[in-house]
Image (cartoon, helix red, strand yellow):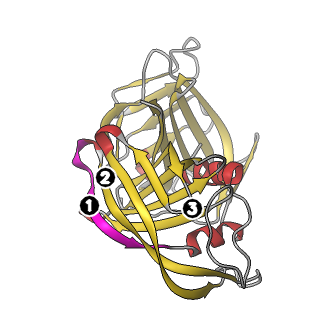
Amino acid sequence: MPACLLALTVLGALLTAPTPAGAAHSAGPGFTGAFRLQGSNGFSILALALGRENGRGNLLLLVSGRGGNVIYAMPATVTPTAVEADLGDLGVVSVEFVPSGEEKTVHPSCGDKQPFAYESGSYVGTIEFHGEEGFTQARVSSTPLLVKPIVDVVCPGGGSGESSGPGLSGARLRVASGRGRNRLTLQLNKNRHRARTRFEASLREFRDGIRIERSVKGVAVASAFLFDSQLRVARVRPRAPFSGAGIFRRRARSGRRWSGNLTVDFPGKAGVPVATRRSRATLVHADRSEGRWLTTKP
Protein backbone atom coordinates (compact mmCIF):
# COMPACT_ATOMS: atom_id res chain seq x y z
CA MET A 1 0.00 0.00 0.00
CA PRO A 2 1.44 3.43 -0.90
CA ALA A 3 2.45 5.61 2.02
CA CYS A 4 -0.33 8.15 1.58
CA LEU A 5 -2.93 5.38 1.62
CA LEU A 6 -1.38 3.82 4.71
CA ALA A 7 -1.63 7.15 6.51
CA LEU A 8 -5.28 7.54 5.58
CA THR A 9 -6.01 3.94 6.57
CA VAL A 10 -4.51 4.38 10.01
CA LEU A 11 -6.19 7.74 10.48
CA GLY A 12 -9.51 6.33 9.37
CA ALA A 13 -9.23 3.55 11.92
CA LEU A 14 -8.20 5.75 14.85
CA LEU A 15 -9.47 9.25 14.17
CA THR A 16 -12.78 10.56 15.45
CA ALA A 17 -14.34 13.86 14.42
CA PRO A 18 -12.24 16.97 15.22
CA THR A 19 -13.41 19.44 17.83
CA PRO A 20 -16.27 21.51 16.35
CA ALA A 21 -16.24 25.27 16.08
CA GLY A 22 -16.78 26.96 19.41
CA ALA A 23 -15.20 24.20 21.49
CA ALA A 24 -11.75 24.17 23.04
CA HIS A 25 -8.97 21.85 21.94
CA SER A 26 -9.08 18.77 24.18
CA ALA A 27 -7.39 15.41 24.60
CA GLY A 28 -8.33 11.97 25.81
CA PRO A 29 -10.29 9.36 23.80
CA GLY A 30 -10.54 10.65 20.24
CA PHE A 31 -7.94 13.37 20.84
CA THR A 32 -5.90 14.35 17.82
CA GLY A 33 -2.94 16.68 17.80
CA ALA A 34 -0.22 17.37 15.29
CA PHE A 35 3.07 19.16 14.97
CA ARG A 36 5.63 19.61 12.21
CA LEU A 37 9.43 19.51 12.27
CA GLN A 38 11.95 20.59 9.68
CA GLY A 39 14.38 17.73 9.20
CA SER A 40 17.78 17.80 7.56
CA ASN A 41 18.42 17.06 3.88
CA GLY A 42 15.17 18.75 2.82
CA PHE A 43 12.78 16.40 4.64
CA SER A 44 9.72 17.54 6.59
CA ILE A 45 8.29 15.54 9.50
CA LEU A 46 4.59 15.72 10.33
CA ALA A 47 3.63 14.04 13.60
CA LEU A 48 0.04 12.98 14.39
CA ALA A 49 -0.82 11.95 17.96
CA LEU A 50 -4.00 9.91 18.15
CA GLY A 51 -5.56 9.23 21.55
CA ARG A 52 -7.75 6.24 22.35
CA GLU A 53 -8.63 4.84 25.80
CA ASN A 54 -6.82 5.03 29.15
CA GLY A 55 -3.98 7.02 27.62
CA ARG A 56 -3.28 4.40 25.00
CA GLY A 57 -2.86 5.76 21.52
CA ASN A 58 -0.71 5.93 18.43
CA LEU A 59 1.90 8.23 16.99
CA LEU A 60 2.34 8.60 13.25
CA LEU A 61 5.39 10.27 11.76
CA LEU A 62 4.99 11.23 8.10
CA VAL A 63 8.44 12.05 6.72
CA SER A 64 8.46 13.51 3.21
CA GLY A 65 10.95 15.04 0.82
CA ARG A 66 12.12 14.94 -2.78
CA GLY A 67 13.85 11.65 -2.05
CA GLY A 68 10.59 9.92 -1.15
CA ASN A 69 8.36 9.36 1.85
CA VAL A 70 8.33 7.26 5.00
CA ILE A 71 5.51 6.67 7.47
CA TYR A 72 6.25 5.34 10.95
CA ALA A 73 3.27 4.12 12.99
CA MET A 74 3.81 3.13 16.63
CA PRO A 75 1.99 2.82 19.96
CA ALA A 76 2.15 5.90 22.19
CA THR A 77 0.77 7.29 25.42
CA VAL A 78 -1.57 10.18 24.63
CA THR A 79 -3.21 11.98 27.57
CA PRO A 80 -5.01 15.32 27.85
CA THR A 81 -1.65 17.00 28.52
CA ALA A 82 1.14 14.84 27.10
CA VAL A 83 2.43 12.61 24.31
CA GLU A 84 5.02 9.91 25.07
CA ALA A 85 6.57 7.51 22.59
CA ASP A 86 9.83 5.55 22.61
CA LEU A 87 11.12 5.28 19.06
CA GLY A 88 14.13 3.15 19.96
CA ASP A 89 17.08 3.94 17.70
CA LEU A 90 14.88 6.41 15.83
CA GLY A 91 14.59 8.79 18.80
CA VAL A 92 11.97 9.84 21.33
CA VAL A 93 8.89 12.01 21.75
CA SER A 94 8.22 13.18 25.31
CA VAL A 95 6.21 16.41 25.42
CA GLU A 96 3.51 18.22 27.34
CA PHE A 97 0.89 20.42 25.77
CA VAL A 98 1.11 24.01 27.08
CA PRO A 99 -2.00 26.03 26.11
CA SER A 100 -1.67 29.66 25.11
CA GLY A 101 -5.12 30.71 26.31
CA GLU A 102 -5.98 31.91 22.80
CA GLU A 103 -8.69 30.33 20.68
CA LYS A 104 -8.11 29.93 16.94
CA THR A 105 -10.20 28.71 14.04
CA VAL A 106 -9.10 26.70 11.02
CA HIS A 107 -10.94 25.93 7.78
CA PRO A 108 -10.52 22.69 5.80
CA SER A 109 -8.70 23.24 2.53
CA CYS A 110 -11.62 21.87 0.53
CA GLY A 111 -13.62 24.95 1.56
CA ASP A 112 -17.08 23.40 1.86
CA LYS A 113 -16.63 21.85 5.31
CA GLN A 114 -17.41 23.28 8.74
CA PRO A 115 -14.59 25.31 10.37
CA PHE A 116 -13.11 24.13 13.65
CA ALA A 117 -12.06 26.10 16.71
CA TYR A 118 -9.38 25.06 19.17
CA GLU A 119 -7.20 26.44 21.93
CA SER A 120 -3.73 27.05 20.55
CA GLY A 121 -0.53 26.17 22.33
CA SER A 122 2.75 24.29 21.99
CA TYR A 123 4.23 20.90 22.72
CA VAL A 124 7.18 21.39 25.08
CA GLY A 125 9.75 18.77 26.05
CA THR A 126 11.99 16.49 23.99
CA ILE A 127 11.46 15.60 20.34
CA GLU A 128 14.25 13.76 18.56
CA PHE A 129 14.21 11.86 15.30
CA HIS A 130 17.17 10.07 13.72
CA GLY A 131 16.34 8.59 10.33
CA GLU A 132 17.99 5.33 9.35
CA GLU A 133 21.21 5.67 7.40
CA GLY A 134 21.18 9.37 8.33
CA PHE A 135 18.62 10.32 5.68
CA THR A 136 17.22 13.03 7.97
CA GLN A 137 17.61 14.34 11.54
CA ALA A 138 15.53 16.64 13.73
CA ARG A 139 15.63 17.81 17.35
CA VAL A 140 13.53 20.48 19.06
CA SER A 141 12.33 21.30 22.58
CA SER A 142 9.16 23.19 21.60
CA THR A 143 6.86 23.22 18.60
CA PRO A 144 3.37 24.69 17.98
CA LEU A 145 0.24 22.56 17.97
CA LEU A 146 -1.19 22.07 14.48
CA VAL A 147 -4.82 21.21 13.85
CA LYS A 148 -5.19 21.85 10.11
CA PRO A 149 -3.53 18.56 9.02
CA ILE A 150 -6.17 16.71 11.04
CA VAL A 151 -9.02 18.86 9.75
CA ASP A 152 -7.93 18.34 6.15
CA VAL A 153 -8.43 14.58 6.46
CA VAL A 154 -12.10 15.25 5.63
CA CYS A 155 -11.08 16.65 2.22
CA PRO A 156 -10.99 14.24 -0.75
CA GLY A 157 -7.60 13.75 -2.35
CA GLY A 158 -6.43 13.13 -5.91
CA GLY A 159 -6.49 9.60 -7.18
CA SER A 160 -5.65 7.44 -10.14
CA GLY A 161 -7.51 5.06 -12.38
CA GLU A 162 -6.43 2.17 -14.54
CA SER A 163 -8.06 0.11 -17.25
CA SER A 164 -6.56 -3.11 -18.52
CA GLY A 165 -7.23 -5.61 -21.27
CA PRO A 166 -6.31 -6.60 -24.82
CA GLY A 167 -6.26 -3.83 -27.39
CA LEU A 168 -4.80 -1.13 -25.14
CA SER A 169 -1.49 0.38 -26.27
CA GLY A 170 0.03 0.79 -22.83
CA ALA A 171 1.40 -1.67 -20.30
CA ARG A 172 1.70 -2.17 -16.57
CA LEU A 173 4.43 -4.19 -14.90
CA ARG A 174 3.90 -5.07 -11.26
CA VAL A 175 6.48 -6.84 -9.09
CA ALA A 176 5.94 -8.01 -5.51
CA SER A 177 8.27 -9.83 -3.17
CA GLY A 178 8.13 -10.80 0.47
CA ARG A 179 5.06 -11.65 2.49
CA GLY A 180 3.17 -10.71 5.64
CA ARG A 181 4.50 -7.66 7.43
CA ASN A 182 7.56 -7.29 5.19
CA ARG A 183 6.83 -6.69 1.53
CA LEU A 184 8.28 -4.85 -1.46
CA THR A 185 6.16 -3.73 -4.42
CA LEU A 186 7.11 -2.01 -7.67
CA GLN A 187 4.79 -0.80 -10.41
CA LEU A 188 5.65 0.80 -13.75
CA ASN A 189 3.14 2.19 -16.25
CA LYS A 190 3.31 3.51 -19.80
CA ASN A 191 0.26 4.42 -21.86
CA ARG A 192 2.19 4.31 -25.14
CA HIS A 193 5.54 2.94 -26.24
CA ARG A 194 7.02 6.45 -26.50
CA ALA A 195 5.36 7.86 -23.40
CA ARG A 196 7.25 8.59 -20.21
CA THR A 197 7.37 5.92 -17.53
CA ARG A 198 5.46 6.38 -14.30
CA PHE A 199 6.83 4.44 -11.36
CA GLU A 200 6.02 3.82 -7.73
CA ALA A 201 7.70 1.51 -5.27
CA SER A 202 6.99 0.81 -1.63
CA LEU A 203 8.70 -1.16 1.12
CA ARG A 204 6.68 -2.28 4.13
CA GLU A 205 8.45 -3.36 7.31
CA PHE A 206 7.58 -4.13 10.90
CA ARG A 207 10.43 -3.67 13.37
CA ASP A 208 10.48 -3.42 17.16
CA GLY A 209 6.75 -2.71 17.33
CA ILE A 210 6.95 0.04 14.70
CA ARG A 211 5.22 -0.24 11.33
CA ILE A 212 7.27 1.40 8.59
CA GLU A 213 6.23 2.15 5.02
CA ARG A 214 8.77 3.69 2.65
CA SER A 215 7.87 4.87 -0.83
CA VAL A 216 9.26 6.54 -3.91
CA LYS A 217 7.18 7.74 -6.82
CA GLY A 218 7.78 9.73 -9.98
CA VAL A 219 8.26 9.91 -13.72
CA ALA A 220 11.18 8.53 -15.74
CA VAL A 221 12.13 8.62 -19.43
CA ALA A 222 10.39 6.34 -21.94
CA SER A 223 13.44 4.04 -22.22
CA ALA A 224 13.20 3.17 -18.52
CA PHE A 225 10.45 0.66 -19.35
CA LEU A 226 10.44 -1.09 -22.74
CA PHE A 227 8.12 -3.87 -23.90
CA ASP A 228 7.11 -5.58 -27.14
CA SER A 229 3.59 -5.29 -28.53
CA GLN A 230 2.63 -8.82 -27.42
CA LEU A 231 4.09 -8.33 -23.92
CA ARG A 232 6.34 -11.33 -24.19
CA VAL A 233 9.37 -9.44 -22.83
CA ALA A 234 9.80 -6.22 -20.87
CA ARG A 235 13.06 -4.52 -19.86
CA VAL A 236 13.39 -2.09 -17.00
CA ARG A 237 16.38 0.24 -16.59
CA PRO A 238 15.34 3.46 -14.78
CA ARG A 239 17.72 6.01 -13.32
CA ALA A 240 17.87 7.16 -9.70
CA PRO A 241 16.44 6.20 -7.26
CA PHE A 242 17.06 2.90 -9.08
CA SER A 243 20.25 1.11 -10.06
CA GLY A 244 20.79 -1.87 -12.34
CA ALA A 245 18.18 -3.46 -14.57
CA GLY A 246 15.40 -6.02 -14.56
CA ILE A 247 13.80 -8.19 -17.22
CA PHE A 248 10.42 -9.91 -17.51
CA ARG A 249 10.14 -13.05 -19.68
CA ARG A 250 6.63 -14.43 -20.04
CA ARG A 251 7.80 -17.80 -21.36
CA ALA A 252 9.97 -18.49 -18.34
CA ARG A 253 8.68 -20.76 -15.60
CA SER A 254 6.48 -19.22 -12.94
CA GLY A 255 8.66 -17.66 -10.26
CA ARG A 256 11.47 -17.04 -12.73
CA ARG A 257 9.77 -14.62 -15.08
CA TRP A 258 11.30 -11.64 -13.30
CA SER A 259 15.08 -11.42 -12.87
CA GLY A 260 18.01 -9.00 -12.85
CA ASN A 261 20.03 -6.83 -10.50
CA LEU A 262 17.60 -3.90 -10.20
CA THR A 263 17.70 -2.17 -6.82
CA VAL A 264 15.85 0.85 -5.40
CA ASP A 265 16.94 3.46 -2.86
CA PHE A 266 14.29 4.34 -0.27
CA PRO A 267 14.73 7.03 2.38
CA GLY A 268 16.52 5.25 5.21
CA LYS A 269 17.14 2.05 3.24
CA ALA A 270 19.26 2.11 0.09
CA GLY A 271 20.03 -0.63 -2.39
CA VAL A 272 16.96 -2.82 -1.82
CA PRO A 273 16.90 -5.64 -4.41
CA VAL A 274 13.73 -5.87 -6.49
CA ALA A 275 14.36 -9.43 -7.75
CA THR A 276 14.48 -12.14 -5.08
CA ARG A 277 13.55 -15.81 -4.89
CA ARG A 278 10.11 -14.75 -3.67
CA SER A 279 9.48 -12.16 -6.38
CA ARG A 280 6.37 -12.48 -8.53
CA ALA A 281 5.72 -10.29 -11.57
CA THR A 282 2.78 -9.63 -13.89
CA LEU A 283 2.72 -7.74 -17.19
CA VAL A 284 -0.58 -6.69 -18.80
CA HIS A 285 -1.88 -4.20 -21.33
CA ALA A 286 -3.14 -1.16 -19.40
CA ASP A 287 -3.77 2.57 -19.53
CA ARG A 288 -3.49 4.68 -16.39
CA SER A 289 -4.83 8.12 -15.56
CA GLU A 290 -3.44 10.15 -12.69
CA GLY A 291 -4.80 12.69 -10.23
CA ARG A 292 -1.69 13.88 -8.42
CA TRP A 293 1.75 12.50 -9.25
CA LEU A 294 5.03 13.42 -7.68
CA THR A 295 7.17 14.24 -10.71
CA THR A 296 10.94 14.11 -10.69
CA LYS A 297 13.37 14.92 -13.44
CA PRO A 298 14.57 11.77 -15.19
Provide the residue designation for mark 1: 139
80 versus 185 height, above or below: below
Q: Amino acid at mark 1?
A: Arg
Residue 104: image x %, image y %?
58, 87
Marks 2/1: CA distance? 6 Å
Q: Which residues are magenta?
A: 133-145
Provide the residue designation for mark 3: 80
Residue beneath the point at 38% across and 54% down: 94
Instruction: Identify the residue at the far top of this view.
Output: 253
Magenta: main secondary structure: strand
Q: Secondary structure at mark 3?
A: loop
Provide the residue designation for mark 2: 129
Residue 265: image x %, image y %?
33, 42
Disc 1 packing (10 Å; few <14; some 14–19; many ≥20): some
Tag 2 near tag 1, CB within 8 Å: yes
Disc 2 packing (10 Å; few <14; some 14–19; many ≥20): many
